[in-house]
Amino acid sequence: MGLSGLDSSFAMTAIVPASTTLAPLRPAAVLGMFREVLESSLIERGAEQGLELLGPAADFWHQVDLAELQRMAEGGNASAQAELAWRCAVGDGTPRSYAEAQRWSARSAEAGCAAGEAVLGWLLYHGHGLPQDRAEAASLFASAAAKGQARAADLLARCRFFGRGVVGDKAEAVRLWRQAALQGTATAMFSLGLCLYAGEGAAQDRREAVEWFQAAAANGIVGAMFLLGQCHTFGLGVAANARAGLAWYEKAAEAGSAEACFELGEAHAAGRSAAGQDLGEALRWWRAAAHRGHARACVKVAHCHRWGDGVSENKELARSWYRRAVTLGEAHAQVWLGECHEHGEGGAVDLAAAADHYRIASEAGDVHGQAEYGRCLLHGIGVAADPTRAEVLLRAAAEDGWTSALGELERHWFAEGERAMRRPAGDPARAVACYRKAAELGHRQAALMLAECLRYGVGGPADLAQAVRWYRKAASLFDAKVALGDMYFYGWGVERNAREAVRWYEQAVGQHEDAYAMYSLGYCLLHGQGAGRDVATGMNWLEQAARLGEADAQYELGSAYYRGEGVTDSKRALEWLASAASLGHAQALAFLERIERGGPLN
């Protein structure tokens, strides 16, 4: 990736289907399931689940034909009126009519029939056939529950749990659900289990939660089957048993649970099934979940087609699955769809569309989307460049855990600094400002360049103390190590400390075979500066530097041989002095002239 980052994309670091992470639903997700289950319409679910509003007599009333039921209702039978109201509400054997449901349930409720009160209360709760009035609905549920109507207790518990039409009281909701559950109401069993599982309205007790899930599952509650899969898989309230967990997921999937289908896909992808990893089987389950409207499953199916995992690669099909996930409200799918548009996968390149998808994901709070849209704004990809806004988004993404977002920002400012420095007219002041921004974000090369500018007064006044500070920020870089050695050796911007200088020179030569660093270390060791005098080691470093063409090292080496530092070797001394002189080393030239004149060497 170039310094500008124009070819980069955070989305390329995709989590492929095979790298599925094993994790149970968090309490927040369980509460989301709560809302889905508890707020779904009794009217819509009633026909499917055979909800019994008339208690033990429900089987009798279900068998009464419509004509006879109407006759009995007209004759004033309150139970018949409640059953007729129910059939009108769900469209069972007669066209759905909320007005008729309201008329018959009102007559039944007026007669004091708990089932009629329950139906009328729910119509009022949802505003079906008459203005919504949740306070009146809760009052009707309470009246019916007091008469022993278990379904009404279940409905009142929902009102209490969410504070709808009545003061919220989760503990009271739990009490009511327990009452209804003990009377055999399956949905109350499930709701009670959810409360115990999540610790809502009661102390968390997953062992008891499992017992209620089992009771609810035995009564056909699909969500309970799914959560039993979770509990057995992760050992929540029951001993962990992956095989039992998969069995419950399969039961839930067969009963229509999209979430269970998704989990089965995850299990096969991660190799948690008896057959081991099987991406083809994982795809089959993800596709089943996707067809049932599971947004994350759509994303998984798209990933499989995009990268050819468990199926032939088909980027056009991948794009269509990402699009389906987007229509289902999956914000992160906007990011993947944006990447397809940006890189021309499965269709033409469309940078404007890519940026728009990233924007939508960002505005939905998706941290990956924030990072991608910030990148587009930073570089003007598909949208007008806006570095200020880009920086806000990238910093926000980093704070939310997308740490690579800062890398994009720091590379941008470093590249801007380099461009400013290379301009024909030059703009060192802007270069310094850009280097500083990048360095403050952690860009080590920018920290080094900023230190150099501060050291030599480029783009502003020199500040040796600040130069040392930034060299330290870039200390993992070889050039920064050498610079720190010099700063400490000469006392530039810091108190002179030859020992610290030697430490930095040693680190430098350990990182890179550089002639100047070798010379500096050799000089210190030869003259005993910053460390005990070590002539042999010092001469060795000087010779290595000299052979690499370092004139100062050649001069020091020649002088040492001539003076007898460790060993006297006039011939080698003259050779190294001559080599240094040929490189224009003034001290070497002067040394040779004094030798020729026979004058003093110092």
Image: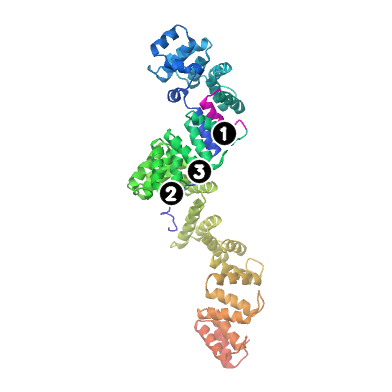
**Reading the chain from its start, which is encountered first: label 1 or label 2?**
1
Three-letter code for the amino acid on which mark 2 is drawn: Gln
Q: Which residue is mark 2?
A: 277
Which residue is rendered at x = 41% and y = 35% of the image?
A: 293
Which mark is in front, 2 or 3?
Answer: 3
Q: Position of residue 595 (x, y in %)?
A: 58, 91
**Reading the chain from its start, which is encountered first: label 2 or label 3?**
3
> Quick one: 358 or 62, which is closer to the camera?
62
Q: Position of residue 137 (x, y in %)?
A: 53, 19
Q: Position of residue 492 (x, y in %)?
A: 62, 68
- 142 lies above or below 111: below
State the mark number for residue 209: 1
Query: Is any atom of residue 221 visible in this view?
Result: yes
For label 2, count other residues whose C-alpha is less than 10 Å away and answer few (under 14), some (14-19) or many (20+): some
- 160 lies above or below 244: above
The span from disc 1 to disc 3 (Cα, nearest Å) is: 19 Å
Find numbered disc 1 in the image and state the secondary structure of the residue it sits on: helix
> Quick one: 10 or 35, which is closer to the camera?
35
Q: Which residue is mark 3?
A: 242
Which residue is rendered at x = 52% and y = 56% of the image?
A: 438
Query: Is any atom of residue 376 visible in this view?
Result: no
Q: Position of residue 267 (x, y in %)?
A: 46, 44
Three-letter code for the amino acid on which mark 3 is drawn: Ala
Quarter occupied by the C terminus: bottom right
- Magenta stretch, residue numbers: 183-202
Most frequent secondary structure within the magenta stretch? helix
Three-letter code for the amino acid on which mark 1 is drawn: Ala
Left or right of 576? Residue 15 is left
